[in-house]
Image: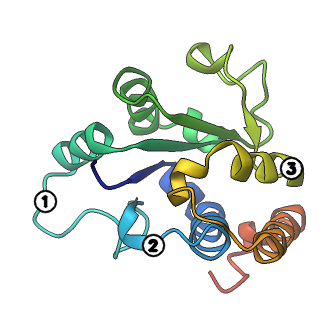
């Protein structure tokens, strides 16, 4: 069975928002090792020097067991992100879209207008993400109190708009 690999599809402009999601929700909360995540905004999980960017993105989507899309206004305005969205739709059976306002259920676009979407800034949606996708953390038992703590801290971070200021240690 191939090793689980999670592809994080996001706009590079949203790095201050997405890096804490990767760190707090995936790494600390769900205890997913960084070597199981492909995330281009981090040097240790992204594209290595000398690699062809387009070829690497294609290979990573092809080999991903899940694609997490962080769909924001920046995402919808990025040609690369829209290409990743379409590629994930065709190539991956496990696509998990998160939206953040002003993107909403009506404006998310054709590929996800019938998809059960999760709101990135909604605590209960982040708990549902944990419940609905145990395959991401190899069906291991996760410390619920720790996951809840990480979710609450991440929601507070988004609610305070601190990601726009580049704080929270990121």
Out of 79 and 131, give the one closest to the viewer.
131
Q: Mark 2 or 1 closer to N-term?
A: 2
Q: Are marks 2 and 3 in contact (CB under 8 Å)?
A: no
Q: Mark 2 or 3 closer to N-term?
A: 2
What element does badge 2 sit on?
Answer: loop
The span from disc 2 to disc 3 (Cα, nearest Å) is: 24 Å
Residue designated by label 2: 33
Question: Callout 1 environment at 10 Å: few (<14), some (14 to 19), or many (20+)?
Answer: few
In the image, residue 17 sits, relative to residue 166, either above or below, namely above
In the image, residue 119 sits, relative to residue 17, either above or below, namely above
Question: Callout 2 environment at 10 Å: few (<14), some (14 to 19), or many (20+)?
Answer: few
Q: Position of residue 149 (x, y in %)?
A: 83, 75
Residue designated by label 3: 122
Residue at left 83%, top 65%? 161
Q: Mark 1 or 3 closer to N-term?
A: 1
Residue at left 73%, top 82%? 168
In the rendered structure, the answer to whether residue 113 lies left or right of residue 153 reads left
Q: Where is residue 42 in the image (x, y as percent from the top left)?
A: 41, 71
């Amino acid at each position: 069975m191939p090793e689980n690999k999670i592809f994080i599809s996001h706009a590079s402009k949203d790095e201050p928002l997405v890096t804490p999601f990767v760190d707090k929700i995936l790494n600390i909360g769900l205890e997913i090792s960084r070597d199981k995540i492909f995330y281009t905004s981090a040097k240790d999980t992204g594209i290595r020097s000398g690699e062809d960017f387009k070829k690497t993105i294609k290979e990573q989507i092809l080999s991903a067991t899940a694609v997490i899309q962080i769909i924001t206004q920046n995402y919808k305005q990025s040609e690369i992100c829209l290409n990743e969205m379409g590629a994930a739709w065709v190539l991956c059976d496990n696509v998990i879209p998160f939206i953040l306002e002003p993107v909403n259920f009506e404006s998310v676009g054709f590929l996800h207008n019938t998809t059960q979407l999760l709101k990135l800034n909604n605590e209960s949606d982040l708990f549902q993400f944990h419940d609905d996708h145990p395959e991401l953390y190899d069906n291991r038992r996760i410390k619920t109190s720790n996951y809840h703590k990480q979710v609450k801290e991440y929601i507070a971070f988004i609610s305070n708009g601190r990601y726009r200021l580049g704080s929270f240690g990121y």
